[in-house]
Image (cartoon, rainbow, N blue to C red):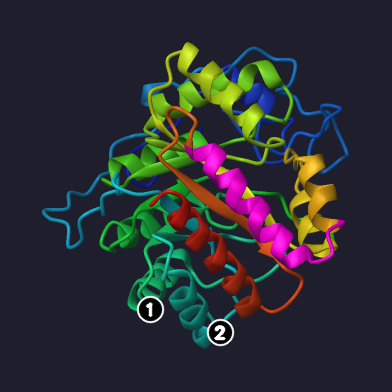
Amino acid sequence: MPRRRNGYQPQMFASDELGARCPKHMVYGPCGGVRPDGACELGDRACPFVDAPLVRWHASEVAPRAWPIESRSAAVPAIPTDRPFVITDLRTVPFDLDSIEAVTRRLSVFGDAVLIGEHQNRPDYPPSFLARVVADSGGGPWVTLTCRDRNRIVLEAELEALAQSPIFGVHCVTGDARAPSVRPDASQVFDLDSLRLAALARAHGLRVSVAASPAAPPDELRAPRVLEKQRAGAEVCFVNHAGGPGPVARFVAAAREVGVTLAFIPCVAVFTDVMSAAVLEGFPGLVLDQREREQVLGAPDPRRAGIDAAVAEAMQMLDIDGVVGINLSGAATSGSELESAAIMAEVAEGVRAGRG
């Protein structure tokens, strides 16, 4: 096996055999995109990790950085404890700085941070650049890094840049695979997966978050897998939509039972029409509360009903022991990005008001 440029030579583990059958080359699978029948998110094969034993974290998997940094120019902001910590998905026009600024300013009136995503079906600015733009617009960046479009060297460069930026954290996920029709001219990299990326991010002094998908098979491995992510360096876990506060509470309790001590931030579904609900339902491994869905979409005023339902769900999530904040998640509306931001801001205002 060839040696890395910095002298690091990856070790071979039993899970590498599983990774050879995974389109994302994962060592620490499965990802959160496993379909209900155990199929890969691509739908063309079975996930090799579903029926395999839990893959344990190997501390020697990621080598220390080969270059020292004497000081950091930006401290990691503290997560507030005197009020609800509200993170909102950032939905903007691609490659539009005015849109990023306007949406960020609208969201930041009642929200603490914005979750900067990485999309498999649309272009994005580089994460470290986006973090600067969001910060300059008055927002608190929480930046997503995926392994799909960047090799390890580029991911390390992004982490170096983020370590010099005033960000709340870096959200380390393997990333969704692109559909065959989305940029077939570009390769998908997947040098790393979420655990190995989390270890690298922690080595750079960043607050590291990871994701958990309680509704994705294999159910029995989802809580223990969070423990392995914690061992790799994660401090916060974003809990994907699992059908409402009840399933999330059971998942957090199960994680605590196996030794997980990190903080949880559950996703709260924000939708006000059929299309914005369908956006969330289109992701493998995510499940909406069907009763809530019917009530919102069947209401005389779905916009008002969607906002009220999201506030109520957020309040229930915040009552779960171990939850330190909530992530207002989704497109919110089929309308414009500014309309989406207005709805998200109204939900955030309602959560703040409800919690004093």
Q: Is residue 192 visible?
A: no
Precedes in sequence: disc 2 or disc 1: 2
Query: Which residue is denoted by mark 2 in the rendering?
Result: 96
Q: Position of residue 164 (x, y in %)?
A: 25, 62
Q: Is residue 34 visible?
A: yes
Q: Is residue 316 part of the magenta span, yes or no?
A: yes
What span is in magenta?
Answer: 298-318
The residue located at (28%, 62%) in the rendering is 166
The residue located at (41%, 71%) in the rendering is 109
- Residue type for callout 1: Ser
- Residue type for callout 2: Asp
Q: What's the mark number on residue 137?
A: 1
Q: Quadrant of residue 75?
A: bottom left
Q: Position of residue 115 (x, y in %)?
A: 49, 58
Instruction: Classify mark 1: helix, strand or loop.
Output: loop
Q: Quadrant of residue 218?
A: top right
Q: Is residue 352 part of the magenta span, yes or no?
A: no
Q: Position of residue 342 (x, y in %)?
A: 58, 74
Nearer the camera: disc 2 or disc 1: 1
298 and 109: which one is in front? 298
Relative to residue 29, is residue 151 depicted above or below?
below
Relative to residue 165, is residue 51 depicted above or below?
above
The residue located at (65%, 60%) in the rendering is 307
**CB under 8 Å between callouts 2 and 1?**
no
| Total numbered labels placed on residues in the image | 2
The residue located at (76%, 62%) in the rendering is 276
